[in-house]
Image (cartoon, rainbow, N blue to C red):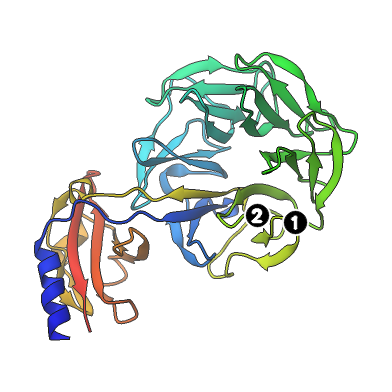
Amino acid sequence: MKTLKVLLSLLLILSFSSVISQTIYYASNRVLNAVNAYDEDGNYLNEFIEKDSGGLSNPQDIVLHPDNFLLVTGSNNEQIKKFDALSGAYLGDWSDDSFDLGRPSKMSIGPDGLLYVTQWGTTSATARVVRFDMDGNYLGGFTPLAPTGLGHVWDDDGNFYLAVFGVSTGIGNVRKYDPNGNLIEIFIDSTFLENPTYIWWDSNGDMLVQDFTAGKVLRYDNNGDYLGEFITGLSNPEGITVLENGHILISERGANQITEFDSDGTLIGQWDDGVGTLAGPNFIEPIETPTFGIDDLGASVVMVTPTMGRQFNFEESLTGDYESIRIYNMAGVEVETIHLDEQRFWNASGWAEGMYFLVALDVHGRKSHQKIIVSK
């Protein structure tokens, strides 16, 4: 034990350039205007973007910006919101405020490096897929009128495919556009499909389509010809990701859960562990948490004493500048959030020995950190 403490003390003194990144899975806690975080095994980590943070309302999608912050759309928000990728703190509106997005929904960074955003436009006659550069500047519409567009993908030729929900027309379809946004064809019609939400390419080149109303995933070949049902018995599916082992995660908005299937579509069971509130999830997205260095964490300040042990007491002076402090392990995964108006110490006896980072934003938006060591 003495040797371990000496080694840990040396680690605390040395400067660390980075910590190991890890994939975190984010799911919309849509009803509560929040975003939950899960580890790779489906264990609930925390409410990463807290309820109503920055005015987020009815969250629809999340992407990691190349500069390592998160972009989140809310269909009741006129602009895309920006959040810190390490703490989940609100950093302001990101998109150009000269343009009202009109209920933004699903997002992707395209092969051209631009951000593509669908507009949930049941209230807008001009809704379409629009684009932004990575500085948040509005570049205009990409597609012709697409009033209820949701999930979208590209093919190897740069063609763009859009799932169009059937709210306005009573039918849904998947549309194919060329790289300039010109409509080529209705790639999948409404013969078997009711209301598509997300679309993706299977490993064999088929297109899989979530049908929100029918509670199914349908399979089509790369010409848009119907091949049959792939997964059935879902409750309002809206959101999908594929794990490294080929298993498929589907967020079931109607069942308030995320469900796992193997690559053949066989049910494995509920993926999330049921801990924490998950209300109306409509996306499940994997994001590799950015590797961060000490410089990225802001100034080093004393937040707790002692700096080594298993119980750490927060300095009384913090209450005027900070509302909460987030605690990360060496993998960059948040293990706990402390709200200073509710708690004056952190008991780390339930966590593994090693280095941890305390990270906080003050009332002026400045980031600060402190390194500590948990030892028994």
Image label count: 2
Q: Is residue 165 left or right of residue 1?
A: right
The image shows residue 28, relative to residue 224, as above or below, that is below
Q: Quadrant of residue 90?
A: top left
For label 1, the residue is: 265
Quadrant of the rendering where the C terminus is positioned: bottom left
- Dot 2 lies on which element? strand
Q: Residue at x 32, y 64 (%)?
A: 339
Q: CA distance from mark 2 to mark 1?
A: 8 Å
The percent coordinates of residue 263 (x first, y second) are 69, 55
What x and y, as percent, mark residue 359?
A: 25, 57
Image quadrant where one finds the N terminus: bottom left
Assign a secondary structure to mark 1: loop
Task: Kindly identify the amino acid type of the residue bearing the numbered disc 2.
Answer: Ile
Task: Name the residue rendered at 34%, 51% in the picture.
Answer: 86
- Horizontal side of 11 relative to 214 (left or right) equals left
Q: Give me the residue at 72% from left, 23% from top.
A: 176
- Can residue 50 be seen here? The reply is no
Q: Nearer the viewer, residue 296 or 291?
A: 291
Circle 2 residue: 248
| Mark 2 in CB contact with mark 1 (< 8 angstroms) | yes
Q: Is residue 136 left or right of residue 342?
A: right
Using the rendered view, name the quadrant where residue 149 is placed: top right
Specify few, some or many for label 2: CA neighbours under 10 Å numbering under 14, 14-19, or 20 or more: many
Residue 219 against residue 160 in the figure, above or below: below
Q: Residues within 10 Å of mark 1 (few under 14, many from 20)?
A: some
